[in-house]
Image (cartoon, grey):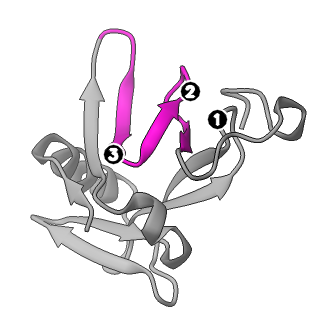
Amino acid sequence: MIRISEPATEALRTLLQSKNAGPEAGLRLAVTRGGCAGWQYEMKIAEPGEGDQVSETEGGRLIVAADSLEKLNDCVVDYVDSLSDAGFRIRNPQASRSCGCGTSFETEDEPAPDPSEVEDCGKN
């Protein structure tokens, strides 16, 4: 199960309204191979695909790609708004290491690939 914090729920609700997203659309999370730590998070406003997990909290719809459920299990989606940065952040208890920019991670059971096989951090 994936949880979404109150600040993330508010930010997501505002984002969906500003994008005039349809009633089925939400923040879709996925994990793909890549990034500087081996796995990278992908986030976009989209409608759910077949098998995706959908949860809604106070108007903030969160969609998790079916093929990413295992890597995102027990995560918390949060929203940070500071002087230097703002955006959604994923706190993933399965991540044994994260990259400096916070967009990719490594798990204990699947260490990062050889650096020559992945994109540079922050360029994806």
Residues at discs 2 and 1 in contact (Cβ within 8 Å): yes
* Marks 2 and 3 in Cβ contact (< 8 Å): no
| Label 2 residue SS | loop
Picture quadrant where residue 87 is located: top left
In the structure shown, which secondary structural element does the residue marked by tag 1 occupy?
A: loop
Q: For marks 2 and 3, give the CA distance.
A: 15 Å
Task: Give the magenta-colored segment's residue range.
Answer: 83-107
Q: CA distance from mark 3 to mark 1?
A: 15 Å
- The image quadrant where one finds the N terminus is bottom left
Check disc 3: other Cα within 10 Å, few if <14, some if 14-19, many if 20+.
few
Is 98 colored magenta in this rendering? yes
Pointer 3 with pointer 1, Cβ within 8 A: no
Question: Which residue is painted at 44% across and 70% down in the image?
Answer: 69
Q: Earlier in the sequence, mark 2 or mark 1?
A: 1
Residue behind mark 1: 37
Q: Residues within 10 Å of mark 1 (few under 14, many from 20)?
A: many
Task: Name the N-terminal-most of marks 2 and 3.
Answer: 3
Q: Please state which amino acid type lies under the numbered disc 3.
A: Pro
Question: Above or below — where is 119 with respect to 28?
Answer: above
Name the residue located 35 percent from the left edge and 63 percent from the top edge: 73
Which residue lies under the disc numbered 2? Answer: 99
Which one is in front, 56 or 120?
120
Q: Residue at x 41, y 69 (%)?
A: 64
Task: From the viewer's perspective, tell me whether residue 109 is left or right of residue 81.
Answer: right
Q: Amino acid at mark 1?
A: Ala
**Residue 7: x %, y % from top left:** 15, 40
Residue denoted by label 3: 93
Q: Is residue 82 visible from the viewing direction of this image?
A: yes
